[in-house]
């Protein structure tokens, strides 16, 4: 008798997994970099090409690194959320203008507002590759020791900020 | 108005399907022939209603009725008529309608060709199919209605995905669905037999032609899809082990196993339990494929737009249909008899060994397709399972299966003897080994895989030839032609289908072993050579299509100074959604394809160009069509034709007591 | 108008003086072959069902550029793959590495085959003992044939 139940049991297991699968997003790929030191870089700044922007300058701070571009529609979606967060002053946001035209990026920020403390420029997308960026916008939470603690793929929503980012930032700051 | 008629027809069809799915099955259980008699007219009515709905949607597309959401989303006023009609199955809602339509078409076919079935069996079969159809009609009417209105109407439709604007895409989905859904007949036969407790040799005999027809359609459907990927995606590949391709390949593997297992059950009455399970599996995998494509649990190039509600619906439907039938199986199968005996080394034994290999291969494809999902669900990380995995797992499983394919048809039923087989096969074996070792050297490069592929192909061919020769020695007839004609069609069918596999293997082996490609930057007048052929770029010009503009390159191809052909690859831009498509130009040939696709324009009028020389690639699809031809030959066999012809004459025979158990 | 231009260009340049062998797109065909060899087993992250070799996504182009650079630096295949895996995870590999979590994936097919083969052999052995020979007699076969051939509504 039992061997005749085998196909049914296998099927039940598959259905359970498929059911769980429905709640997952196959496009989202967890980053292996979470828990590791953020890659070093030294990129020119958007508003002042003479100056550079490097994570080394931010040791001892908890900060957000946001990859964005003027051509990216998801960045437009999350922009008000970033503006709100910047206004609240709870955590500094640093921008990385990813594979973009400088003048277009400047116009974009002029038009929609600039939430960033400093904006770096990653024209060739090399910093993006080192951070494992595969679709902008992407946002990283980096702790005082320069370790990546969290990665958000796709736009930030008020919900993500409230429930995930800010509690994490508070916890990291108290360390 | 017309779309509302279509919508209404679907609602009526659902009502009819509910009746068809309940009354006849109940009637068969209690022996009420009035209730059982509902099945046939209900199935025909349902077919008619879904046909009406299908035509209504077709009409909406033909008339460019952009007040229908689905029409507005998948077509455009610039789209030529034949593509507007093909757009019926260009996206989720319409392809479901096609699915349902084909299901009712198969039902209709069952009502036509089932006069020889006992009424209880027929009512159960149509009842089960009616239940499946209830699920699909409900699915359409609740979360995927193709007739949903868009008010106010869109002034212009979006467009059919340019990838699908292709003659191959016009016929690929109907063929594929004919196959998928065709397995529902074998499934319904199996469930009916389980319900009635009369799993007998007659059941296997009845299921065989239906299964073979569905298998033929599926084979052609898969081949068309693969051919489409080859020339439309512009990468020159023909199979990517993409989840959606796997979704069509798994039912094929199960169906192939079923076709062979039915032969054992038909001949020896054995392994009924296994055959029934395969019949359930083949259709279940078709349904699973539908789920995988539409629920968005896996990413795929072809996946339809996804919606969690839809995913949940199909999953629930899957759970009920497959779970229900497997539960019925667990309950009823233990009571089924064992059937006749046979030795391990016999035709039956080898068919079953082949079954084990095919099912293991099917299981591997399933495992590889779902494994990333399993890991993700358990939060163990994300992985990708792609062509390198499937290639390295699939080939070792198929090699013994193909080797057995050569021996099986020559082994005696019931009990075969090794020395006898060895004696009959030694020439085939010798010829295969020697030519497999030498042929690649003659062709210019020897690799183990090349040799293995050729070995298997030649092995299948030579053993088939031996089989045919022995067969000819045993049939009556004076001339060769007469004797060839008296070999049964079913035997020819098997032979042809097996040779189709051999042709397919030759194609795969030769392409993998000898294909060459070149990425070049070509300016006007410059030449590039690949595989003895010289390509000269004669410039690019703008052309205008019905709903696109394109840059068309002109390439003159010559060989040894003689002109071979002129190829016109295009880079098309479809303004409706501003999409760019690479339209490769191919010069097909029996021994090689020449393939050119335009890359990007470079400075000073030059283009990046990709050239391929693909030896024997058309044998891949040719092999598939030969396989399907073999299936067609098998079902044209005398015994089926006789059964059908007699059935027509025998209709007025007065009813006698039901003879339920035959064996 | 454009046609004329094209014709003119063709006329101008198709003379034998201009006709020449087209250059390979890549500067270094050997490196390109190695890139191709690597890239067909790597998954593009943007359009997720294409290989890195086939994809035209900007990120895929960037990654190919990175891989080219690494090839130029004479890094081994292993090092190049590690570079990508450390950034994007095992997801980029179309050939999943053998790990604790993927053991079932790699062993599964062959386990399935072994179990299937064992089950077949055991079942056939057991049948040989329990089945009385020829349950479907020729007589019964004939009856099936007859039933099929006669047809008619028999219930």
Image (cartoon, coloured by chain):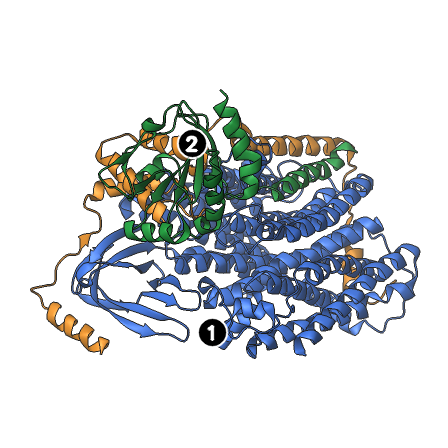
Q: Colour of chain A?
A: green
Q: Position of residue B322 (x, y in %)?
A: 72, 47
Does C31 sit above or below residue B256?
above
Chain in blue colour: B
Q: Position of residue C33 (x, y in %)?
A: 27, 42
Q: CA distance from mark 1 to mark 2?
A: 52 Å
Q: Which element is circle 2 on?
A: strand
Q: Position of residue B210 (x, y in %)?
A: 67, 59
Q: Colour of chain C?
A: orange
Residue that carries the numbered disc 2 in the rendered image: A63
- Of the two numbered discs 1 and 2 in the rendering, the one whose residue sits closer to the viewer: 2
Label 2 packing within 10 angstroms: few (<14), some (14-19), many (20+): many
Left or right of B231 in this view: C10:
left
Query: Which residue is situated farthest in the left direction here?
Result: C17
Q: Which mark is residue B79?
A: 1
Chain ID, mark 2: A
Which residue is pictured at 56% across the width and 52% down the height? B248
Residue B432: tell me if it is visible.
no
Query: Which residue is situated farthest in the top direction here?
Result: A175
Left or right of B234 in this view: B201:
right
Residue B130: tell me if it is visible.
yes
Left or right of B198 in this view: B298:
left
Q: Which mark is residue B416?
A: none
Label 1 packing within 10 angstroms: few (<14), some (14-19), many (20+): many
Q: Observer-nearest residue: B369 or C138?
A: B369
Chain ID, mark 1: B
Left or right of B549 in this view: B263:
right
């Amino acid at each position: 008798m039992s061997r005749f139940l085998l196909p049914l049991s296998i099927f039940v297991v598959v259905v359970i997994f498929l059911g769980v699968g429905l709640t997952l997003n196959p496009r989202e790929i967890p980053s292996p970099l979470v828990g590791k030191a953020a890659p070093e870089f030294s990129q020119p700044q958007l508003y002042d090409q003479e100056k550079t922007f490097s994570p080394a300058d931010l040791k001892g701070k908890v900060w957000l690194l946001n990859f964005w571009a003027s051509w990216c529609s998801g960045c437009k979606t999350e922009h008000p959320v970033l503006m709100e967060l910047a206004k609240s002053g709870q955590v500094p946001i640093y921008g990385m203008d990813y594979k973009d035209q400088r003048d277009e990026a400047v116009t974009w920020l002029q038009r929609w507002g600039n939430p960033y403390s400093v904006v770096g420029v990653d024209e060739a997308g090399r910093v993006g590759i080192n951070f494992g960026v595969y679709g902008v916008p992407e946002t990283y939470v980096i702790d005082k020791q320069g370790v990546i603690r969290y990665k958000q793929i796709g736009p930030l929503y008020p919900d993500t900020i409230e429930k995930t980012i800010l509690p994490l930032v508070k916890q990291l700051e108290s360390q | 108005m017309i779309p509302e008629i279509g919508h209404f027809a679907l609602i009526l069809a659902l009502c009819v399907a509910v009746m068809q799915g309940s009354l006849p099955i109940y009637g068969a259980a209690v022996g009420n022939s009035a209730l059982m008699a509902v099945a046939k007219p209900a199935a025909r009515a349902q077919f008619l209603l879904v046909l009406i709905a299908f035509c209504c949607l077709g009409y909406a597309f033909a008339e460019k009725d952009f007040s229908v959401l689905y029409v507005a989303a998948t077509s455009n006023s610039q789209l030529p008529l034949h593509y507007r009609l093909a757009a019926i199955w260009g996206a989720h809602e319409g392809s479901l309608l096609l699915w349902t339509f084909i299901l009712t078409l198969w039902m209709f076919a069952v009502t036509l060709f089932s006069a020889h079935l006992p009424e209880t069996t027929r009512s159960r079969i149509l009842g089960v199919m009616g239940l499946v159809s209830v699920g699909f009609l409900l699915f359409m009417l609740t979360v995927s209605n193709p007739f949903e209105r868009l008010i106010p109407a869109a002034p212009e439709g979006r467009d059919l995905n340019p990838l699908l604007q292709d003659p191959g895409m016009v016929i690929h989905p109907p063929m594929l669905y004919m196959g998928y859904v065709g397995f529902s007949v074998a499934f319904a036969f199996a469930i009916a037999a389980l319900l009635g407790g009369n799993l007998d040799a007659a059941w296997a005999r009845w299921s065989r032609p239906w299964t073979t027809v569905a298998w033929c359609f599926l084979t052609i459907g898969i081949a068309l899809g693969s051919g489409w990927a080859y020339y439309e995606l512009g990468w020159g590949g023909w199979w990517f082990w993409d989840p959606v391709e796997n979704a069509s390949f798994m039912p094929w593997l199960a169906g192939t196993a079923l076709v062979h297992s039915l032969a054992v059950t038909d001949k020896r009455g054995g392994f009924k339990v296994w055959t029934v399970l395969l019949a359930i599996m083949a259709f279940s995998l078709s349904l699973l494929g539908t789920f995988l494509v539409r629920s968005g649990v896996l990413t795929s190039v072809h996946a339809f737009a996804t919606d969690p509600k839809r995913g949940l619906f199909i999953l629930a439907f899957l759970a009920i249909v497959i779970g229900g039938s497997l539960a019925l199986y667990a309950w009823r199968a233990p009571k089924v008899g064992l059937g006749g005996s046979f030795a391990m080394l016999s035709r039956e034994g080898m068919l079953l060994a082949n079954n084990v290999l095919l099912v293991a291969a099917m299981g591997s494809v399933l495992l590889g397709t779902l494994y990333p999902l399993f890991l993700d669900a358990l939060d163990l990380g994300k992985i990708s399972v792609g062509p390198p995995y499937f290639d390295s797992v699939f080939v070792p499983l198929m090699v013994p299966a193909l080797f057995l394919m050569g021996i099986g048809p020559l082994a005696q039923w019931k009990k075969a003897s090794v020395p006898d087989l060895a004696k009959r096969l030694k020439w085939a074996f010798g010829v295969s080994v020697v030519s497999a070792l030498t042929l690649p050297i003659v062709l210019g490069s020897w690799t183990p895989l090349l040799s293995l592929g050729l070995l298997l192909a030649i092995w299948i061919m030579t053993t088939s030839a031996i089989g045919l020769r022995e067969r000819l020695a045993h049939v009556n007839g004076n001339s060769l032609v007469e004797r060839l004609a008296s070999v049964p069609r079913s035997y020819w069918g098997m032979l042809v289908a097996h040779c189709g596999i051999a042709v397919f293997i030759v194609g795969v082996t030769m392409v993998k072993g000898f294909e060459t490609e070149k990425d070049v930057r070509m300016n006007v007048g410059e030449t590039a050579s690949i595989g003895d052929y010289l390509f000269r770029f004669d410039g690019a010009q703008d052309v205008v299509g019905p709903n696109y503009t394109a840059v068309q390159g002109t390439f003159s191809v010559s060989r040894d100074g003689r002109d071979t052909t002129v190829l016109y690859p295009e880079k098309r831009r479809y303004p409706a959604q501003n999409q760019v498509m690479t339209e490769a130009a191919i010069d097909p040939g029996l021994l090689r394809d020449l393939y050119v696709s335009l890359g990007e324009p470079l400075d000073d009028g030059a283009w990046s160009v990709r050239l391929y020389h693909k030896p024997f690639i058309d044998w891949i699809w040719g092999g598939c069509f030969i396989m399907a031809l073999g299936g067609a030959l098998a079902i044209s066999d005398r015994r089926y034709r006789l059964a059908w012809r007699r059935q027509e004459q025998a209709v007025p025979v007065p009813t006698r007591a039901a003879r339920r158990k035959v064996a | 108008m454009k046609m004329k231009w094209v014709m003119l260009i063709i006329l101008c340049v198709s003379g034998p003086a201009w006709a020449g062998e087209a250059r390979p797109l890549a500067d270094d065909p050997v490196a390109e072959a190695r890139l191709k060899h690597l890239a067909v087993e790597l998954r593009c992250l943007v359009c997720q069902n294409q290989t890195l070799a086939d994809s035209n996504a900007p990120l895929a182009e960037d990654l190919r550029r990175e891989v080219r650079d690494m090839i130029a630096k004479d890094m081994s295949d292993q090092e190049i793959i590690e570079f990508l895996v450390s950034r994007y995870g095992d997801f980029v590999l179309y050939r999943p590495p053998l790990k604790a979590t993927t053991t079932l994936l790699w062993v599964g097919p062959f386990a399935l085959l072994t179990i299937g083969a064992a089950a077949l052999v055991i079942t056939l052995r057991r049948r040989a003992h329990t089945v009385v020979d020829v349950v479907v007699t020729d007589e019964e076969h004939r009856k099936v044939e007859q039933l099929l051939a006669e047809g008619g509504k028999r219930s």
